[in-house]
Amino acid sequence: MGVAYVGGALRKAGFDVHLRDGTFYRNWSEFEEDLKKIKPDALGISFTTSLEKQVNKYISITRKILPDTAIIAGGAHSTAHPGSVLEDFDVDFVIHGEGEIAFPELLTFLNEKGGRKNVIGKKIEVKGVAYRVGKKIEVNSQRPFVDNLDELAWPARDLLPMEKYLKNVPLMPLPYPSTGLLVSKGCFGNCIFCQPILRKLSGSRNRYRGVEDVIKEIKYLIKTYKIKSLDIGNDEPTYDRNWMISFCDALIREKINIKWGLPSRVDTVDPEMLNKMGKAGCVYIAYGIESGSQKMMDNLRKGTKVEQAEKALKWTEEAGILGRSNLMVGSMGETKETIQETINFIKRAKPDLIFCAATIPLFGTDLYDISKKEGIFVEGTDGITDYDFGHLKIKDLSTDELRAGLNRIVKTYKRNLVMFMLNPKMLFRKRHIYIRMFLYFFSLINNRKGLVKVMDHYFNYGRHVKSKN
């Protein structure tokens, strides 16, 4: 979505823009042919830490075919440490922070100076840009975050292969087909596994688009792509209670028939708001609970309580919305006892859905820096690609014991689902789960490959965490 927003900003500024998703190139020859055909004056690359090897390949091919093309890096990895990107990659410029304003300004500057060859090695007065002057790396101050998000162009989805994206199976219970939507930027949280990189990317203050602008985009998406649901992928869309209620009122008033889901903290919801969201089409909320142990919540700097998580899940269920508990296992301080506390939490809170994964120390986060400093980061795993256990050394718990702990959490959740069906009272209380599941699978009836894939995933969920030995 970030690349599409930058593409929209560049097009609004008058540039001829081409967007490509590198995952769709079947081989490097296709990328080479694309370069020769388009012959871009500038190539922008947004990437995460796990894609370092592929990015170097894209850069080397571009240098060989189009030596005068300016290569510009952006995204989370580039924002975390722009100077190290210039050291590790053969790029000309790095954009750190939001790119919707900085990227067009940098290209305008390059055009005014006659292109890359007239700028390399010289001072650049563009905020949010890092570059080289001889052997010295200059990192300009970060550009202030955009206050009025309505000033930004909508993402240039039409420049991407939307027909391919729309074939992707959405998360349960979002009906197929589905697409993403951004309604706000910023996160006030201080979680150890996200910060400070998230603050650098989008700020600590939550900024919202106008409800009217969001409604217009939703209508456009329904008309253009025939979508049935939306995945609102912001960091904290429920933070501003008044905005969320106004958004729901607009959906109801406009009689927009769309299902949607979003992430949320457990301390930013209440029964009245959740009931309104349910009436407006919200079918699931993914809560970043992380653990059923207060000790682990505190270690992760969540700033929430286990009791708040239980209340949020209860209120969400009462509103007829599926509440998903996002959990992680294997953080610093994890023990057999804290894993058991999470299992006990699953038994008590009875979340409708769960997502459970290994804790990953991502580049640019405090978790990464602290684990390196304390010597518990497993050296040689910086280029994280598998998102599995084995990146952190947890005292008294082996990798296999962590996998087994995660497996026990998943089995506890599955056992809950079976018990619901065997208990008429619980079956009635949890009927929204089974209704949403049925409607979800039914929406996939014309996408047989997707249906088979998703059924295999959900019915076999948990087996992937078995020991690899």
Image (cartoon, grey):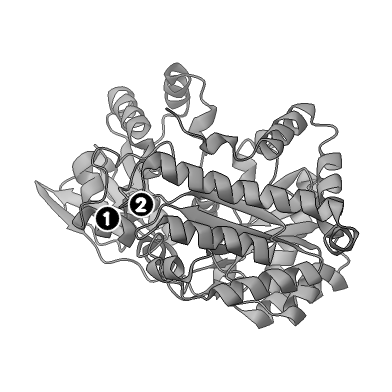
Q: Mark 1: which amino acid? A: Ser
Q: Which residue has dot 2 on it?
A: 361
Q: Is residue 126 left or right of residue 136?
A: right
Q: Is residue 122 left or right of residue 293?
A: left
Instruction: Give whichever of 306, 91 is nearer the camera.
Output: 306
Occupied quadrant, residue 287: bottom right
Q: Residues within 10 Å of mark 1 (few under 14, many from 20)?
A: some
- Asked if residue 48 is positioned above or below residue 236 in the image, the reply reads above
User: What secondary structure is marked by label 2?
Assistant: loop
The numbered dot on residue 391 is: none
Q: Mark 2: which amino acid? A: Pro
Instruction: Give whichever of 60, 134 is nearer the camera.
Output: 60
- Asked if residue 15 is positioned above or below residue 167 in the image, the reply reads below
Instruction: Give whichever of 295, 259 is nearer the camera.
Output: 295
Instruction: Give whichever of 311, 246 is nearer the camera.
Output: 311
Marks 1,2: beta carbons within 8 A: yes
Q: Which residue has dot 1 on it?
A: 371
Real-space Cα distance between discs 1 and 2? Answer: 8 Å
Occupied quadrant, residue 326: bottom right
